[in-house]
């Protein structure tokens, strides 16, 4: 009996010991860790109110506002090329001369044909007048019953035939006049000018020269290219997310490596109404005044466009925003502990982040927050301890 009693007591003792150990092990480990952990040293910064801007940056290339190729309309040998690359040209200025001997000969021939047709016309008019007089005389004689009806009909037929011949001579005149005008136009095409239709008086530049004097050219063979550099275009592409925020008339600025530290103002002039299906991007053209000619087509540029601007926005340092459980938020000091406040970030400008909601006041933890969880003890700097302690944690206002 004593042996059984001893065994029973030992079993009870072991059971009580196991239950105690199990109870201690079933406690939350973080509670014990929190009790054992020292306060986390942190740094805080105040929540500010300021204007924030969403400035998008795009990359692209510069293009001339207008560009075209000067080419002849007729075939011929290039006798003179009066401009070279980099020269300025005005609207209608003569830039090239083709060999026009053949076309001048065609003009001379057309003039001679016209003179012949005019002489023929004079002859036909004289013949018509004679035929008409003969008809009038035959009609009078027929009224006097001196001639027969057959003779009158024959005189009338000759008169009408002379009228028809005159009509043919007049048509020949018109045809030869048209041939002369065509020959003169073709001759004028040997003088190749740089002309554009906008009517502006500003000079343009010769961007490229394609041929030399003496070359035999066919119609539409390029001689030189002309560009308008008074205004240049920056061509960029915006993604689907930014497409609704971009509109014609918005201000923009461009920068290029050719002029470090300098920006050039511009304006969005055109926006494609559709996005390219393969890239989900839309083309945007920004016009930039270029009165000094400093910007050149082909330059690689960065384009900055202000998409949004919020005045009086709630702003915190970017280092204050962290994620816990996939939720963005900030830690705010609440006495000697840190409180996690979920937030909805807005515009990011430099080292600042706009907080769209909830409204925040006081200060936020910017250093040491990566070690924090909601409710953990914190040690505030002596300088900002009073400020942080007196701050009210951010909560949603009713």
Image (cartoon, helix red, strand yellow):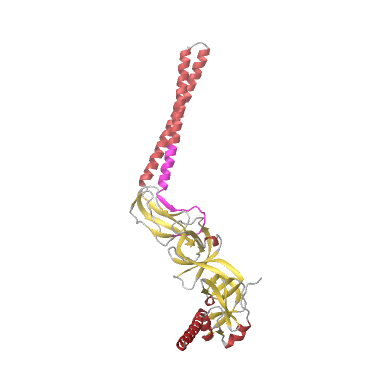
- At 45% from the left edge and 23% from the top edge, which residue is drawn? 161
Residue 397 horizontal side relative to residue 231, left or right: right
Q: Residue 357 lies in what quarter of the image?
A: bottom right
> Is residue 155 shown to the viewer in this render?
yes
Q: Position of residue 166 (x, y in %)?
A: 45, 28
Q: Is residue 352 left or right of residue 115?
A: right
232 or 376, which lies in front?
Answer: 376
- Taking 170 as reference, is 60 above or below it? below
Residue drawn at 58 percent across, 88 percent down:
382
Q: Residue furthest top?
A: 145
- Based on the picture, tell me whether residue 180 belongs to the magenta stretch: yes
What percent of the width, then of the height, locates residue 80? 37, 55
Q: Residue 71: x percent and y percent? A: 40, 52
Please provide the residue range marked out in magenta: 176-205
Quarter of the image where the C terminus is located: bottom right
- Whether 12 is drawn above or below 180: the answer is below
- Label tally: 0
Give the residue at the far right of this rendering.
398
Describe residue 109's horizontal placement relative to residue 142 as left or right.
Answer: left
Name the foreground residue: 288 vs 348. 348
From where the camera sits, is residue 294 visible? no
Residue 368 higher or lower than 356, as above or below: below
Front-most of residues 282 and 175: 282
Quadrant of residue 48 in the image?
Answer: bottom right
203 or 23: nearer the viewer? 23
> Could you say where residue 336 lies in the image, as x and y percent from the top left?
59, 84
Q: Is residue 112 shown in magenta?
A: no
């Amino acid at each position: 009996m004593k042996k059984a009693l001893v065994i029973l007591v030992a079993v009870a003792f072991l059971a009580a010991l196991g239950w105690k150990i199990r109870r201690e092990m079933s406690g939350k480990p973080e509670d014990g860790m929190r009790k054992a952990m020292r306060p986390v040293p942190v740094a805080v910064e105040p929540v500010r109110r300021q204007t924030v801007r969403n400035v998008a940056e795009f990359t692209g290339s510069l293009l001339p506002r207008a560009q075209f190729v000067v080419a002849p309309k007729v075939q011929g040998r290039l006798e003179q090329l009066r401009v070279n690359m980099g020269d300025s040209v005005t609207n209608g200025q003569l830039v090239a001369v083709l060999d026009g001997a053949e076309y001048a000969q065609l003009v001379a021939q057309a003039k001679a044909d016209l003179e012949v047709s005019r002489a023929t016309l004079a002859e036909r008019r004289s013949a018509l007048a004679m035929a008409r007089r003969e008809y009038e005389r035959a009609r009078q004689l027929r009224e006097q019953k001196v001639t027969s009806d057959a003779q009158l009909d024959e005189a009338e037929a000759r008169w009408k035939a002379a009228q028809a011949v005159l009509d043919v001579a007049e048509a020949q005149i018109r045809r030869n006049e048209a041939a002369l005008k065509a020959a003169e136009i073709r001759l004028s095409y040997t003088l190749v000018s740089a002309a554009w239709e906008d009517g502006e008086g500003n000079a343009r530049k010769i961007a490229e020269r394609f041929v030399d004097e003496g070359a035999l050219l066919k119609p539409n063979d390029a001689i030189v290219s002309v560009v308008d550099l008074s205004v240049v275009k920056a061509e960029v592409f915006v993604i689907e997310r930014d497409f609704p925020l971009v509109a014609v008339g918005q201000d923009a600025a461009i920068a290029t490596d050719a002029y470090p530290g300098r920006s050039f103002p511009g304006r969005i002039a055109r926006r494609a109404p559709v996005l390219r299906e393969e890239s989900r991007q839309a083309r945007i053209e920004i016009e930039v005044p270029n009165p000094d000619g400093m910007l050149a087509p082909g330059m690689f540029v960065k384009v900055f466009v202000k998409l949004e601007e919020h005045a009086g926005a709630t702003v915190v340092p970017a280092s204050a925003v962290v994620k816990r459980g996939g939720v963005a938020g900030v830690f705010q000091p609440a006495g000697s502990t840190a409180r996690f406040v979920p937030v909805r970030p807005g515009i990011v400008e430099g080292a600042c982040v706009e907080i769209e909601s909830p409204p925040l006041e006081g200060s936020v933890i910017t250093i040491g927050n990566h070690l924090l969880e909601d409710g953990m003890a914190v040690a505030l700097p002596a300088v900002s301890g009073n400020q942080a302690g007196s701050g009210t944690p951010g909560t949603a206002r009713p």
